[in-house]
């Protein structure tokens, strides 16, 4: 076939050719509505009543779960140990989940099993409805309210109102409970690192000799003698550090920070300056450190500056050196707050 000849489909497809009367031919046949099947509840009053009881049961689950959440909020506080925090999170999470799930499932089941099962078709129209359509829409809403039979089913009405009214307490009570709590943000301005504190492996707590750190290796680091009894968990969380050794030739260090590294070994806070996830994915070839939460990427060779992503400032650097025995130690605490940038803006 010559390239100048029209394609066969183009020659036979007249569906886009305007007719003389200004209309286009129909391209597809309207398949119409599938056959309507009646639900059990539409023909059997017992099934209808059973469906109502199921909806009530789901709302009751939500009510009980919300009450359980509120009780657990006071009875199972997070405490200072990982176990108690885990238990508190588990109980509160389950309470919230069941509370929302009960409301959601009840709404869906109500709509599917109890509301009137009319099928309605509406032709497409312009984006803005005509005034008459708007008036009709209000009527449809009113019909919907009548179809839901909320006025007649008092038990269902009561449990639904109870579930919806109670649920906001699961959000309000913890917020109100924290009013007057520990809002002292100055604690974000310092960590447990002190001059002479040894860098140790996380979680084993083994001191690290500079000679054991090979080029390209990465260490997850915590301060020496980290005792959770003495230091609460949030203090440990603030102090976590990622230590990397690079070829000293690759390091771009500012004049004032030249003494903060040791033989190419640099240490940075592991808490992302975006919203605080642990940055832990290090790519040796590029020296990039990636935060898995929103992909902020920091250049370890260049002061952990942000090269990509939503973080707005570099990771704070921990100045390090070695002691007489060759173990890596901190020269001081961080010189700026660790964690999300928000705290940097406050006077700490
Ligand atoms: S918390 Fe790290 S990128 Fe968002």
Image (spheres, helix red, strand yellow):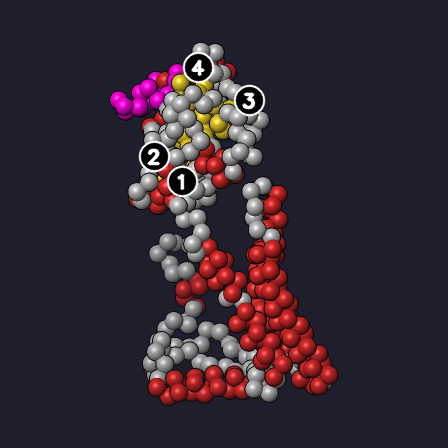
Q: Earlier in the sequence, mark 4 or mark 3?
A: 3
Q: Camera-side residue: 42 or 163?
A: 163
Q: Which residue is mark 1?
A: 187
Q: Earlier in the sequence, mark 3 or mark 1?
A: 1
Q: Secondary structure at mark 1?
A: helix
Please provide percent x and percent y for residue 76: 60, 52
- Magenta segment: 249-264
Q: Secondary structure at mark 3?
A: loop
Disc 2/disc 3 C-alpha distance (Å): 26 Å
Q: Which residue is at a point 44% across and 62% down the rendered structure image?
A: 8
Q: Which residue is mark 3?
A: 206
| Residue at the farthest left position | 255
Indicate the quadrant where residue 333 lies: top left
- Tell me the quadrant of the picture where the N terminus can be found: bottom left
Q: Which residue is at a point 38% across and 22% down the rendered structure image?
A: 331
Disc 4/disc 1 C-alpha distance (Å): 28 Å
Q: Which residue is mark 4?
A: 323
Disc 2/disc 1 C-alpha distance (Å): 12 Å
| Residue 41 higher or lower than 212, as above or below | below
Q: Which residue is mark 2?
A: 336
């Amino acid at each position: 076939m010559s390239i100048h000849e029209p394609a066969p489909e183009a020659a036979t497809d007249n569906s886009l050719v305007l007719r003389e009367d200004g209309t286009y031919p129909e391209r597809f046949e309207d398949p119409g509505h599938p056959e309507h099947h009646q639900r059990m509840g539409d023909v059997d009053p017992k099934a209808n009543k059973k469906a109502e009881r199921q909806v009530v049961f789901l709302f009751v689950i939500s009510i009980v779960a919300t009450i359980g959440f509120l009780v657990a909020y006071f009875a199972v506080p997070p405490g200072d140990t990982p176990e108690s925090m885990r238990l508190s999170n588990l109980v509160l999470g389950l309470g919230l989940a069941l509370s929302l799930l009960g409301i959601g499932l009840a709404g869906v089941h109500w709509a599917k099993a109890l509301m009137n099962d009319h099928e309605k078709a509406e032709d497409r129209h312009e984006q803005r409805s005509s005034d008459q359509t708007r008036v009709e829409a209000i009527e449809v809403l009113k019909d919907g309210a009548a179809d839901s039979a909320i006025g007649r089913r008092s038990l269902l009405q009561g449990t639904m109102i109870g579930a919806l009214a109670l649920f906001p307490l699961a959000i309000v009570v913890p917020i109100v409970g924290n009013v007057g709590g520990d809002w002292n943000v100055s604690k974000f301005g310092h960590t447990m690192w002190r001059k002479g504190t040894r860098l140790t492996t996380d979680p084993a707590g083994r001191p690290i000799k500079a000679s054991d750190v090979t080029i390209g290796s990465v260490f997850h680091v915590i301060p020496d003698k980290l005792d959770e009894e003495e230091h609460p968990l949030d203090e440990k969380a603030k102090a976590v550090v990622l230590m990397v050794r690079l070829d000293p030739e690759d390091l771009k260090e500012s004049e004032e920070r030249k003494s903060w590294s040791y033989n190419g070994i640099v240490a940075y806070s592991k808490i992302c300056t975006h919203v605080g996830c642990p940055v832990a994915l290090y790519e040796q070839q590029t020296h990039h450190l990636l935060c898995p939460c929103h992909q902020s990427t920091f250049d370890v060779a260049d002061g952990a500056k942000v090269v990509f992503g939503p973080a707005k400032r570099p990771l704070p650097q921990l100045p390090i050196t070695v002691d007489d025995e060759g173990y890596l130690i901190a020269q001081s605490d961080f010189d700026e707050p660790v964690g999300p940038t928000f705290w940097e803006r406050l006077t700490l």
